[in-house]
Image (tube, grey):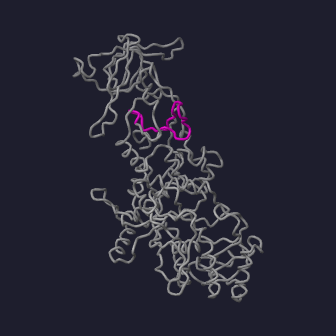
């Protein structure tokens, strides 16, 4: 179905999880490596999820295996279809052309089926090979949902009750927490722990029938209230919640908790390596206990943990991200300042740059804050090779070339991308009046200032050398325009191309310039660890967004949302995919500055 990394491609990364998988492959322990990426659809994916996506899909990709995209949708009170759709879009964008050949789906509309193995009922989801249905993004397939397994999970719960390994508890949520104890203090057994099996079965079926209010009863595993690991102290498996579910509607009013549903969903799908972040390490004994308590017939999945990605200058807590959206600190989940994958995509960052960053960070067992500059470095490296070079002026002042006749248009040759093996060129209009950046002129220049100054010379890139003859001001003393002389013999093909000057600046023809809205995005937070600030609003960067009207070279009028540009000497930019209307002047987002402006 899939192929490992092709010959000549970038070598696959190595880490302790990949080493484990490699050992299992060498031992032929599994017929196929199957991993999964299982987000809960209670928010948008963020940059931290990108690490898990690339790790899980990467392992499948490198071993000719499969990775399932599964919605762990067991909490209907916080989950929405909007989040499901955004997750699908984000994952497909991030892995498209890289690992989409190993993306596992189930047949759309299919229900899990039952078979008997070794005399025991064995449930599985009927995963399909994408090669049998064409491109994995085709409409005939859809991701996995834990909610598709609710019938099987309920049957497994009945099996635990019948074997005396689970019971119905009437303690309130507060009482349950009090009885649990603490890591240094053993818990107390529930007074309902010794209920007869028949009574537990009756109460569980009545819970499902909707007979009891929310919070009045739970199904708990019967393990050990004195266990040092508090997650083994009779954990909750099911709770009552009279809430409609985004995927199953009103069919259920009892819902499994994550720890119960997750391991069994892994089993149902035939997952071999269940890779998750370090906070779930203490949950692993419960993961194993549940699978073993059911005496399941097929080989069981195993959980492995790694350190999550926590970049500096960001918040990646879903609770805090929702707060940013709800309090309108940002315009939405896809605001280009957000660390969400949708925000990163809207800002113009390529999927390949995000993959390079999260892969380069590596996979370890130790949580730490990652320098945000590493992310920006990966973005610049990626865009430098693919972005088309264009001329743009963000803060214009007019410059008049007095020796060029009014109305004359000189076409100059500009390079599209010097990084290409065979760079292409384009024609750019050069006229009597042009715009340059305000910061590229200084009436009283500082030492070692090599840009334009009174009496000084600079080269207009792709055009010629000019000399500043006169500074024109209004009655209030404000700069109106600069009057200069163009040395046209210094143009390409001219008679004086050997002449050298120390400064080169960019420009745009005034009569051909395209006025366009440009959004100058920067880091949302001004401190490296905003999560540690009591009031996160005190850590906001007041300059995270500046909206201006810029002057652009005319070719940018036809820029598409798929293209990426380097505005020469300024930074990398992309058309905003949401607010730029077809046929209208494009709106550009600054993806990233040309250099690290945050470096000390």
The percent position of residue 269, horizontal first and vertical second, equals: 50, 71
Q: Nearer the viewer, residue 381 or 554?
A: 554
Q: Nearer the viewer, residue 455 or 248?
A: 248
The percent position of residue 10, horizontal first and vertical second, equals: 31, 56
- 575 within the magenta span: yes
Q: Does residue 472 lie above or below 190 as drawn?
A: above
The percent position of residue 81, horizontal first and vertical second, equals: 62, 56
Task: Residue 600: tell me if it is visible.
Answer: no
The image quarter containing residue 63 is bottom left
- 50 within the magenta span: no
Q: Which image quarter is the C terminus in?
A: top left
Which residue is depicted at the point 53% across and 34% down? 582
The percent position of residue 150, horizontal first and vertical second, equals: 62, 72
Count of all numbered marks drawn on residues in the image:
0
Q: Does residue 215 lie above or below 484 as drawn?
A: below
Q: Which image quarter is the N terminus in?
A: bottom left
Which residue is depicted at the point 37% across and 68% down? 18
The image quarter containing residue 559 is top left
Q: Does residue 15 lie above or below 455 as drawn?
A: below
Task: Residue 433: tell me if it is visible.
Answer: yes
Boundaries of the magenta span: 566-589
The image quarter containing residue 485 is top left
Which residue is depicted at the point 50% across and 41% down? 522
Q: Does residue 373 lie above or below 405 as drawn?
A: below
| Dominant SS type (magenta) | loop
């Amino acid at each position: 179905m899939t192929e490992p990394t092709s010959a000549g491609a970038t070598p696959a990364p190595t880490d302790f999880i990949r080493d484990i998988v490699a050992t299992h492959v060498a031992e032929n322990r599994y017929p196929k490596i199957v991993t999964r990426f299982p987000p809960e659809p209670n928010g948008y994916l963020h940059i931290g999820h990108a690490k898990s996506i690339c790790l899980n899909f990467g392992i499948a990709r490198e071993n000719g295996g499969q990775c399932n995209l599964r919605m762990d949708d067991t909490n209907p009170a916080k989950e929405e279809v909007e989040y499901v759709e955004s997750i699908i879009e984000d994952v497909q964008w991030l892995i498209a052309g890289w690992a989409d050949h190993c993306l596992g789906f189930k047949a759309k509309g299919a229900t899990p089926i039952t078979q008997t193995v070794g005399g025991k009922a064995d449930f599985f989801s009927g995963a399909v090979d994408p090669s049998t249905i064409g491109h994995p993004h085709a409409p005939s397939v859809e991701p996995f949902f834990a909610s598709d397994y609710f019938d099987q999970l309920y049957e497994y719960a009945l099996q635990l009750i019948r074997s005396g390994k689970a019971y119905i508890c009437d303690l309130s949520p507060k009482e349950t927490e009090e009885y649990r104890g603490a890591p240094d203090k053993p818990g107390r057994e529930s007074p309902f722990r010794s209920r007869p099996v028949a009574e537990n079965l009756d109460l569980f079926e009545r819970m499902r029938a909707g007979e009891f209010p929310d919070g009045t009863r739970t199904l708990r595993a019967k393990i050990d209230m004195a266990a040092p690991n508090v997650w083994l102290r009779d954990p909750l498996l099911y709770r009552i919640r009279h809430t409609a579910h985004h995927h199953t509607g009103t069919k259920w009013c009892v819902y499994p908790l994550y720890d119960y549903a997750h391991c069994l969903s892994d089993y149902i799908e035939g997952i071999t390596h269940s890779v998750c972040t370090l906070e779930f390490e203490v949950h692993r004994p419960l993961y194993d206990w549940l699978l073993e308590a059911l005496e399941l017939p097929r080989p069981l999945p195993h959980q492995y943990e790694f350190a999550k990605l926590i970049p500096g200058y960001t918040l990646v807590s879903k609770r805090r991200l929702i707060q940013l959206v709800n309090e309108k600190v940002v315009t939405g989940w896809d605001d280009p300042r957000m660390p969400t994958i949708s925000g990163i995509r809207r800002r113009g960052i390529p999927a390949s740059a995000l993959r390079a960053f999260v892969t380069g960070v590596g996979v370890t067992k130790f949580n730490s804050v990652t320098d945000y500059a590493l992310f920006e470095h990966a973005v610049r490296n990626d865009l430098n090779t693919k972005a088309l070079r264009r001329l743009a002026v963000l803060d214009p002042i007019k410059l008049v070339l007095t020796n060029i006749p009014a109305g004359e248009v000189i076409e100059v040759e500009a390079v599209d991308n010097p990084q290409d093996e065979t760079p292409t060129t384009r024609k750019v209009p050069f006229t009597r009046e042009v715009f340059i950046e305000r910061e590229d002129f200084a009436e009283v220049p500082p030492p070692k200032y090599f840009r334009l100054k009174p009496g000084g010379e600079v080269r207009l890139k792709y055009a010629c050398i000019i000399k500043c003859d006169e500074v024109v001001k209004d009655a209030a003393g404000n700069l109106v325009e600069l009057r200069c002389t163009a040395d046209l013999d210094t143009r390409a093909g001219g008679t004086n191309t050997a002449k050298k000057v120390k400064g080169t600046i960019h420009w745009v023809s005034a009569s051909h310039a395209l006025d366009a809205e440009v959004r100058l995005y920067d880091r949302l937070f001004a401190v490296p660890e905003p999560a540690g600030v009591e009031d996160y609003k005190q850590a906001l960067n007041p300059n995270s967004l500046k909206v201006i009207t810029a002057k652009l070279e005319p070719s940018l009028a036809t820029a598409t949302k798929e293209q990426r540009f380097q505005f020469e000497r300024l930074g990398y930019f992309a058309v905003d995919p949401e607010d730029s209307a077809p046929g209208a002047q494009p709106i550009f987002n600054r993806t990233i500055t040309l250099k690290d402006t945050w470096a000390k």
